[in-house]
Amino acid sequence: MNLESNVERIYIDQEKLAARINELGEEITKFYSEEEEIVVIGVLNGSFCFMADLVRKIKQPVTIEFFGCSSYGHSTESSGNLKITKDLDHDIADKHVLIVEDIIDSGTTLSRMKIFLNKRNPKTIRIAALLDKPSRRKVDIHGDFTGFEIEDYFVVGYGLDFADKYRNLPYIGILKPEAYKSQI
Ligand code: IMP
Ligand code: MG
């Protein structure tokens, strides 16, 4: 199967992604002072492409961690309904934490993750999100560094999946309706 044959259209192409991530890297570099060390935490699995490109545009020293979680249930405030599938390897107490996420949709996952990680007493927690769908928000949370605000489309590629596939498309795309139905 050729993945691209299921793509209806390219929503954000590779050049736009690269240019915006360059800008985000500059914003982040300016925001944290020169001496500060940042613990960059990628949320599995969707953030892996964005994270790889973003950290190479940040000039401060960074350490890299991955965090795997999924949220369940409808409670919006509590971090209790967060299933941890991969915890951090190191302590983040007194560190500057930058969470890197592919997309903020309802905001539930990130808000619970933030509550959960805050209990470990980091110095700061900030969020870099490649995409943001503000129209879908159920919880009051926003990215401190956001790549693109998008409309309410289900997008794939550049890390984002549909049924665990399409993460390796080099751009952000929208699938043909039949591809969403068939779960290829
Ligand atoms: P939230 O808790 O509703 O904000 O869920 C965010 C998670 O849902 C993201 O980390 C993605 O894994 C997934 N997600 C939300 N929208 C999309 C989309 O358009 N394409 C692919 N994954 C999405
Ligand atoms: Mg995700």
Image (tube, rainbow, N blue to C red):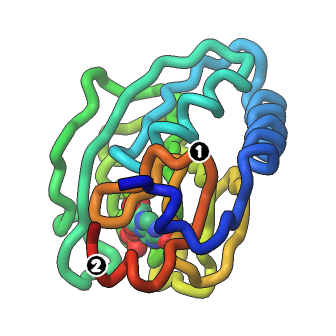
User: Which circle's residue, 2 or 1, is located before the other in the chain?
Assistant: 1
Residue 93 percent across, percent down from the top left: 38, 28
Q: What whole-number distance in Å separates the C-alpha atoms at marks 2 and 1?
A: 22 Å
Going by the image, does 14 lie left or right of 139? right
Residue 117 x, y percent position in the rendering:
34, 46
Residue 101 vertical placement versus 5 (above, below) = above
Label 1 beta carbon within 8 A of ligand 1: no
Query: Does residue 47 sit above or below 76 in this rendering?
Result: above
Between 106 and 93, the one lying in front of the other is 106
Residue type at mark 1 is Pro
Q: Residue at x 59, y 74 (%)?
A: 8
Q: Amino acid at mark 2?
A: Ser
Can residue 111 be seen here? The reply is no
- Residue at 62 percent of width and 26 percent of height: 55
* Observer-nearest of 50 and 27: 50
Which residue does the image show at 18% across and 65% down from the upper left? 80
Compared across the picture, whether 144 is left or right of 127 comes to right
Pointer 1: what residue?
170
Q: Which mark is residue 32?
A: none
| Residue on which the image places disc 2 | 182
Give coordinates of residue 67: x percent, y percent: 31, 40
